[in-house]
Amino acid sequence: MKFAKKYAWAFLILLPFAGGFVPEFKAGPLSLEGERLLLVGTVLCLIYLFIKNDFVLKVSSLTAWLFAYYMYLFVNRLLQDTLVLPEVINFSFPILLMLYIDNLDFKLEDYKKFTIIMTIVGVGSAIASFVQLTIDPLFYSGGDQEVIDQILYYEVMPGVYRNNSLYRGLGTNEGAIALGCLSNLMLFQNFYRVQNKYLIITGMLVFAVFVVFAKYCWLMFLVALMFFMYFKYPKSRISLMIIGGIVLFFIYFFLFDQIEQSSIYKNRISAETYTGRTESTRIFFETFFARKPVFGFGVSSWDFPEYLRMFYIGIHVGIFDTLFRGGVVGLLLLLMFWLQVGLKSYKIFVKTGNPMFFAFILNYILINFTAVLIPIDYYGYYIMLFALAMYYKLFVIQKHDIPATIEEIKIK
């Protein structure tokens, strides 16, 4: 068990710091790089746990519904389209990772180790974002020449490229999701007792969140802040709402005008992004939804030639793209998975008073009404689901009292 848990810590710190530099491994139509190669280690640990536990594995309801969702997508595509072998990998790794987490036993000292690792990753992420913005845009771009070429291309279009921090070599949206989730984790370290260290780290991550220039990333921190303030200061909710309104008013009238005139806003934030979302959704509901509302088309709109002939991109709203691919059945299976997340979040909230995972669920929903980030195979989602499992086992099942600060916990 110690070996399996040690790899969990290794994975959580290696993926951001080294994932973008892991060379790609190709075998026929399959390719593994960065995140997936490191996930192979979790699969090996799962096999080790399976053997060690007399060929028995625990399966949470959360993992069971995730398996049902991905299995449905797989069979639905197989029946309506063709088997795409790399997609099997896309489905398998998140399920196996969740199964791996299900079979880890946590002690209170693991809560401290996890927090320390997230602190290191958070500080490293903020520093990387600062260097990319002010010194070298190619910093931590990874070993993928396509990524480097893309960054160099965007350099002639000021404000368009994203400062994806340590995650630039892993994927376009990896950084935004990771930074949003990390900012949430560090913010809620102050929930029981405000600590200068975590306030500073949260501030550093807010900077990194802003310079990633992704609207949903900004939204992730604001949603978490809303939950944090509302539940931490219950006696001052009306005052906080008034103050929040004044702050938003100030930001809108005194700061937004400057942002609106910048090349970042014009190129990265404003240019046709809203049109892409509304128009792609309109085409879906007017032309496609009624044709296959129950089971969908078996394939994403981004890979459906008929749809792409009508619009230059697929549906830019993850919830509706799920409807396109899996119909109402697919969307219900996805919602059942998130219902399990919600039930565990509620039990954690009842025991600890911490609403952090409610913010995570709402962020996932809001993200997928503005972007197409339904799959959970992103580092940010992984760390939040890992934290969810750890909190649930420690504070709900084992009934530990959650410490006000991690300094109260001794590591043996």
Image: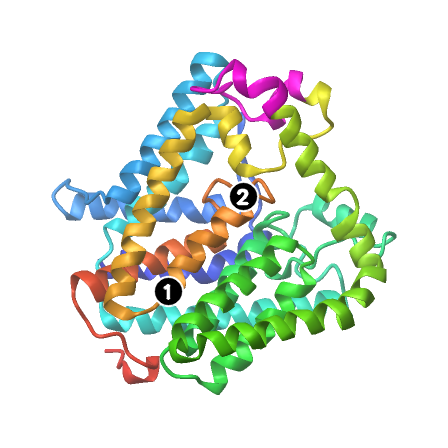
Quarter holding residue 118: bottom left
Q: 28 or 188: nearer the eye? A: 188
Q: 390 or 301: nearer the eye? A: 301
Instruction: Locate residue 76 relative to residue 148 in the image: left or right.
Output: left
Extreme-right residue of the structure: 156
Extreme-bottom residue of the structure: 196
Secondary structure under badge 1?
Answer: loop
Q: Is residue 53 above or below residue 18?
A: above
Query: Range of the magenta residues?
Result: 285-307
Percent from the top left, x then y, of residue 86? 50, 29
Residue type at tag 1: Pro
Q: Is residue 73 above or below residue 236?
A: above
What residue appears at the point 44 percent right and 56 percent down from the top-left corner?
Answer: 360
User: In the rendering, which numbered label is found on residue 355?
Assistant: 1
Judging by the rendered image, the residue that carries numbered circle 2 is 368
Q: 16 or 213: nearer the eye? A: 213
Q: 58 or 278: nearer the eye? A: 278
Percent from the top left, x then y, of residue 317? 59, 38
Secondary structure under badge 2?
Answer: loop
What residue appears at the point 58 percent right and 58 percent down from the top-left corner?
Answer: 219
Instruction: Locate residue 380 relative to residue 137 in the image: left or right.
Output: left
Percent from the top left, x then y, of residue 249? 68, 70
Percent from the top left, x then y, of residue 58? 19, 45
